[in-house]
């Protein structure tokens, strides 16, 4: 079986979609003849082969509306005569290039998120998206919540199948990080609230900072983004410098001791741009409870209120503060929710389970 995976970027480029693509390919590469096609950060096309996997990074002329412009992507799609083509959406360049590429392989779309904020761009792009979804043999949705709440996906419900995202549990093992965890506690104290993510509008970080006025603990923020200066100004205005630390972007392996050193992860997102919240799985894999928000997306599917963590209304800093304080003050509750979270990841959200479901779907599509 020849499979072509088309994503936005590929590691070492960082991001949730990139992590999913990498973990899926790592599991599939020994089972199928696999190629990966993504955009390159520069104008030249690079072909890499490592550990039985060929990755083609297509030269880009730059970006328009956060989308890489890769004029030769359609050629590369056409050049590999795949049995299965899987597009990781949202990805307008891959979508349009696929339609231009006359690729005979059967199309699978991994639909990770609606396009929410770029309304003008969406109006221009929507005809191409609809053509792709109509042509798709199957659409993979990452949670039943997202399928039921997306007006676009509901139009294609009969060809949609739920396969949750998964992570590599081995990466989040506590063993070997004891010194780093002790150093984090020594520097920041014992009551640690953790946020990991891009500092952008939909993440809701201003509400988390507002909540910290009422919290007796330390907030560590891992990530960078266009709101960083604004958020730092908010910390200064509210005299929160002794409660909040910005740690910038860290490599994946550097974040592991911070997950283990923390008491709770907070994902305070405010819009359905937060389609799944992969970082919740990473915290749960480390045995930590999660505080998330009531969004009609996969966020609530991952974090079960009262079981693996707590769920509060989006944009409600008072409710956030109450949930954080409740978990910081109740060690038994934290421990119980952390154990349940780890069990939930082991049962439902491993990369092996994600890949198995995907491969089974390929086989069903080819047999139909």
Image (tube, rainbow, N blue to C red):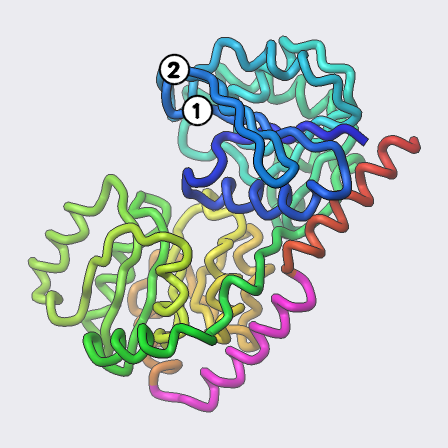
Within 10 Å of the Cα at label 1, are there few (<14), some (14-19), or many (20+) other Cα atoms? Answer: many
Q: Nearer the viewer, residue 291 or 173?
A: 173
Number of other residues with Cα within 10 Å of mark 2, as a class: few under 14, some 14 to 19, many 20 or more: some
Q: Position of residue 165 (x, y in %)?
A: 62, 51
| Residue 127 visible from this viewpoint | no
Left or right, 46 with reference to 1: left
Closer-to-camera residue (351/100)? 351
For the record, the magenta segment spans 329-348
How far apart are the two marked residues, 1 and 2, measured between alpha carbons? 7 Å
Comparing 54 with 263, the one in front is 54
Decide if residue 238 is on the left or right side of residue 203: left
In x, y percent, where is residue 106? 78, 24
| Secondary structure of residue under mark 1 | loop
Indicate the position of residue 246 as horizontal and vertical percent values: 21, 58
Say which residue label 2 marks: 43
- Left or right for 244, reference 249: left
User: For the residue labelled by badge 2, is the local secondary structure a helix, a strand or a loop?
Assistant: loop
Which circle marks residue 293 in the picture?
none
Where is residue 252? Give x, y as percent. 41, 54
Q: Chief secondary structure of the magenta span?
A: helix
C-beta proximity under 8 Å, tags 1 and 2 = yes
Q: Which residue is mark 1?
A: 40
Q: Is residue 237 above or below residue 161?
A: below
């Amino acid at each position: 079986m020849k499979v072509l995976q088309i994503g936005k970027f590929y590691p070492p480029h960082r991001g949730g979609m990139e992590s999913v693509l990498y973990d899926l390919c790592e599991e599939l590469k020994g089972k199928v003849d696999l190629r990966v096609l993504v955009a390159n950060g520069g104008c030249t096309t690079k072909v890499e082969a490592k550990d039985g996997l060929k990755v083609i990074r297509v030269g880009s002329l730059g970006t328009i509306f956060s989308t890489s412009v890769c004029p030769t992507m359609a050629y590369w799609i056409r050049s590999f005569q795949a049995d299965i083509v899987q597009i990781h959406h949202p990805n307008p360049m891959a979508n349009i290039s696929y339609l231009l590429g006359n690729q005979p392989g059967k199309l699978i779309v991994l639909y990770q998120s609606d396009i929410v904020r770029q309304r003008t761009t969406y109006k221009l792009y929507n005809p191409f998206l609809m053509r792709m979804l109509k042509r798709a043999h199957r659409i993979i949705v990452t949670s039943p919540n997202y399928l039921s709440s997306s007006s676009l996906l509901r139009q294609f419900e009969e060809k949609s199948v739920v396969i949750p995202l998964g992570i590599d549990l081995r990466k989040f093992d506590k063993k070997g990080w004891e010194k780093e965890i002790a150093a984090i506690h020594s520097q920041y104290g014992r009551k640690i609230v953790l946020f990991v993510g891009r500092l952008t509008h939909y993440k809701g970080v201003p509400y988390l900072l507002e909540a910290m006025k009422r919290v007796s603990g330390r907030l560590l923020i891992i990530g960078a983004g266009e709101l960083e200066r604004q958020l730092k100004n908010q910390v200064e205005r509210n005299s929160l410098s002794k409660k909040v630390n910005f740690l910038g972007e860290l490599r994946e392996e550097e974040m592991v001791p911070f997950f283990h050193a923390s008491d709770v992860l907070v994902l305070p997102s405010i819009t359905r741009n937060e389609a799944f919240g992969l970082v919740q799985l990473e915290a749960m894999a480390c045995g930590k409870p999660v505080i998330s928000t009531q969004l009609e997306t996969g966020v609530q599917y991952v974090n079960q209120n009262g079981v693996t963590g707590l769920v509060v209304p989006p944009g409600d800093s008072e409710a956030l503060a109450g949930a954080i304080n409740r978990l910081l003050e109740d060690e038994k509750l934290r421990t119980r929710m952390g154990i349940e979270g780890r069990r939930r990841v082991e049962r439902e959200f491993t990369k092996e389970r994600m890949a198995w479901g995907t491969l089974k779907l390929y086989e069903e599509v080819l047999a139909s």
